[in-house]
Image (cartoon, rainbow, N blue to C red):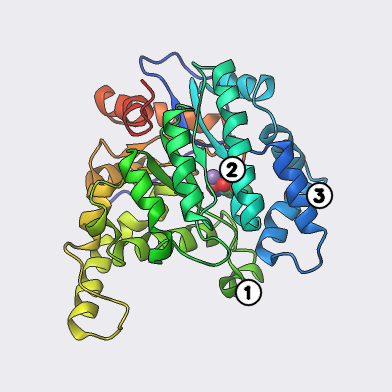
Amino acid sequence: MMKLKMPDTTNPQPPAKVPYKRIATEEAWAPQEMLDIYQKILNHADADAGFRGLMGFYMSSQSERARHIMRCLTDLDQVRLQHMDESGVDMAVIAVTSPGTQIMDRATAVSFAQSANDQLAEAVRRHPTRFAGMIAIAPHDPVAAAKEIERGVTKLGMNSIIINSHTHGEYLSDSKFWDIFAAAEANDAAIYLHPNALPPSMLKPFQECGLDGAIYGFGIETGMHALRIITAGVFDRFPKLRMVLGHMGEALPFWAYRLDYMHAATVKSQRYMSVKPIKQRPSDYLRQNFWITNSGVAWEHAIKFSQQFLGVDRVMYAMDYPYQYAPDEINILDAMDMTLADKTKFFQTNAETVFKLR
Ligand code: 1DF
Ligand code: MN
């Protein structure tokens, strides 16, 4: 039997003309205002260690990668558009980069979220055919967050919400956050649950071997967050709530079989007070309430498996610019052995539907 191949990314070619639009859906942005707030946080010796390891690194390292990323992150005009042109990305769905508001204190987070949304909406007005935006919120103030979701949708024309996983170690499975879900559902705005740096309780065994970041830790923590939301019964309470996960659904499609078996067994044995019955299997919620993007994974086999599990309407393209600005990945994805109809869903129409881009 033939082994699955890893794609060759060492031979960059200009993007081909294709009969679909390429819409990248997990593209990061850092306003200077946010970097100034970050710097103040980092000036304190007791700043969160995961945050220091992540944004503290990018903001201070003289490495080529860090300097390139900082230059790209802060731009919403020429640099970004040039990179999009060079890589064949027609449109970018942009969100404040992780952790965004979620490393800030509550009051700073609330006011920064509003400012960020105004700035992003302005950039979308400058480049309406190239950019769309996600609404930033301060999860640590669920009432303010709900209001900002409504303002973002009705006043700023943005139809999705960025949440960078945990907020100071707290998870959205806690019902104190559920005003956010109610507002997202009422405004029909999808929540993109994106990774954050690992919280202190998880950091050590990952960081001491360099596995805390996008290589692995991000996916573990964000996948767990999504599972906490599912098993807490959020989708029984908010059945129309739509969520998006990056990085191939943080590997949850691959886990689905075991999740279903063990969740049912755990409920039945009453092993944990916290694990209560939910109406459906974990995999059912993954297929009904979640969409995923391939951010960071330009691998046909993983994409096809996810399409087979979730359906071709639920898997979308993302580049994860500028953290994985790898133009040749577009050529690899263009070349996937997939019908034009399914490839058009992957690159274009699923994103248009989920983020309401038309
Ligand atoms: C990294 C990756 C950083 C992703 C990110 O935000 C991020 C990284 C600070 O490589 O350090 O969003 N990512 O989504 O994979
Ligand atoms: Mn990302």
Hey, what amino acid is under mark 2? Ala
**Upstream in sequence: badge 2 or badge 1:** 2
Hey, what amino acid is under mark 1? Lys
> What percent of the width, then of the height, locates residue 13?
56, 22
- Residue occupying the point 81% across, 67% down: 45
Q: Secondary structure at mark 3?
A: helix
Q: Which residue is mark 2?
A: 113
**Upstream in sequence: badge 1 or badge 3:** 3
**Upstream in sequence: badge 3 or badge 2:** 3
> Which residue is at the front of the view, 14 or 93?
93
- Residue occupying the point 61% across, 56% down: 106
Determine whether, in the image, residue 233 is placed left or right of residue 189.
left
> What percent of the width, then of the height, locates residue 215?
56, 56
- Residue occupying the point 68% across, 55% down: 54
- Residue occupying the point 30% across, 28% down: 345
Rounded to the nearest angstrom, the CA distance separating label 2 from label 1 is 30 Å
Q: Is residue 297 visible?
A: no
Q: Which mark is residue 204?
A: 1
> What percent of the width, then of the height, locates residue 303?
34, 42
> Which residue is at the front of the view, 265 or 94?
94
- Which quadrant contains ligand 2? top right
